[in-house]
Image (cartoon, rainbow, N blue to C red):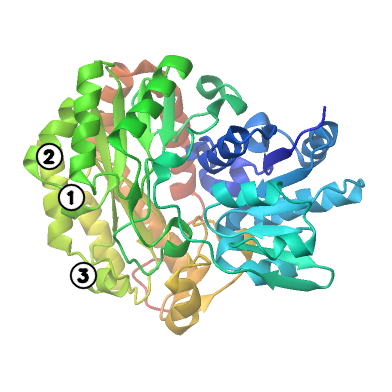
Amino acid sequence: MSLDLVLINPPLTMEERYGKFAALGSNTPNLGLCYLASSARSKGFSVKIFDAPVQDLDINQTVSLVKECRPRFIGVTAPTVSIIRAYRVATAIKDIGIKSPVILGGAHVSALPVETMKEFPAFDIGVINEGELTILDILNTDANPRDLEKISGIVFRDHEDVLLTLPKRPIEDIDLLPYPAFDLLPDLAKYYRPSSHSYLRLPCASLVSSRGCNGKCLFCARPFIGEKYRGHSAEYTLGMIDLLVKNYRARDILFYDDNFLLDKKRVTAICEGLLKKNYNISWSCLARNETITSDFLKLIKRAGCWQIAFGIESGDQTILNNLNKRTTVEKNLKAIELTNKAGIHSRGYFMIGCPGETVESMKKTMDFTVSSGLKDFHSTFCTPMPGSELFDKAESYGKFEKDWNKLGFWEPAFIPKGLSSKQLIATHKKMLRAFYLRPKILLRYAVFGILHPERIASYIKAGLAVLSYVFKTKAMDPVKKDGN
């Protein structure tokens, strides 16, 4: 067998991705690789995907499978948390004598193209930002420097030099892309599952139906996802849902769009289409609070929406301002109230240790989580990721350890001035205890478990992981202001 392209999601364990919260982690399809594969396949190129974490492949097994394919090109994807693993895969590929050019894609190289190529010499080409059209340009070459320098949106190695080409314009009409190549992944229903908080029924599938966001948050790597919002049409989105329901038995859809509800006309058309199809599927999404109105919530509820997750981040207005969230505590409270009133579960995402964070601001956030009416919450440590404005400014706000292995949100890599790592961890544990160890929350999970028996095992596993974390070795009392 000889293929044009092999795409790899590098080996990375749940423990490496989620740390102490491995039991709460998720395995969802790598949609980026699926779009790349379908784009290449639509032009006649032969493609295979190896999703190493899901297929439980180590580096040697992954490389052995790649070798059997004898590919012309090898593509590896990597956000920052897996860049070291991706590099080890690329190095192992070179070490066994495979001569095929290794292409790196994903958020890390997009944010730091030249730096990444210099730091990790086993990569031959880096694709910056969207890759569906760029990969076609590369596949149509022999990867010699004279051809590569004509391709926009890449960084590549020419002997000892690292060369950066002109930027490639974002894809204006993303409906021109073929549907993601789900068929090149392991069985979706068998191998993939979101975190226990994120699905209502199984099988659950995930989709990204738009690119870009109207937010300007300090911590977001906006250039990678695109500064301008671009959505798949309602027809295209409904077509992807058709594919997942008919071919992969999906009963629940998780929309990972940064702000799924932004284009209300598009979402209305999607909802009307779902109601006509009468699939009886449930779905959830991420959204910003300005999209929430009572009438709109009634529509999406009828069309199957069961949960909306809001990026709230903090219960302190000063911190929201520091993060450039462009919203208020009061608006977040109103969105939660309206969502709950519509019979849709409200979930909040929060961060501990933001720029300007203090003991008092963290207490306000903890108080917000328990008094706001949220049905569920999720909290991580504020982490400056490459490509974000915060990454470049972090050291002006506090201590920042730029260790790629630690930029996974589950351990404090950034410590705001006046605070310590121990204080952040102690507050994080206290927040989890304060929210989850309330009778009404425990009762809600019990009722959900009864109504949806397939979730019981994941709830128990997640609950034990949280209890183990919050009651393990007691960290420094968060009310102390000692920053040591």
Q: Mark 3 and 2 residues: CB-CB less than 8 Å, in contact?
A: no
* Secondary structure beneath label 3: helix
**Image quarter of residue 343:** top left
Closer to the camera in the image, 173 or 201: 173
Single out the mark in the foreground, 1 or 3: 1
Query: x, y percentage for residue 288?
Result: 24, 53
Closer to the camera in the image, 458 or 77: 77
Query: Mark 1 vs mark 3: which is more N-terminal?
Result: 1
Q: CA distance from mark 1 to mark 3?
A: 20 Å
Q: Amino acid at mark 1?
A: Thr
Q: Quadrant of the N terminus?
A: top right
Closer to the camera in the image, 447 or 477: 447
Q: CA distance from mark 1 to mark 2?
A: 9 Å
Q: Residues within 10 Å of mark 3 (few under 14, many from 20)?
A: some
**Residue under label 2:** 296
Query: Mark 3 vs mark 2: which is more N-terminal?
Result: 2
**Residue under label 3:** 317
Image vertical order of residue 206 relative to residue 405, above or below:
above
Q: Amino acid at mark 2?
A: Phe
**Residue under label 1:** 291
Q: Is residue 92 left or right of residue 128?
A: right
Q: Is residue 163 left or right of residue 263?
A: right
Q: Residue at x 37, y 73 (%)?
A: 480
Q: CA distance from mark 3 to mark 2?
A: 27 Å
Q: Residue at x 36, y 20 (%)?
A: 251
Query: x, y percentage for residue 260?
Result: 29, 44
Q: Residue at x 51, y 44 (%)?
A: 21
Q: Is residue 315 left or right of residue 61?
A: left
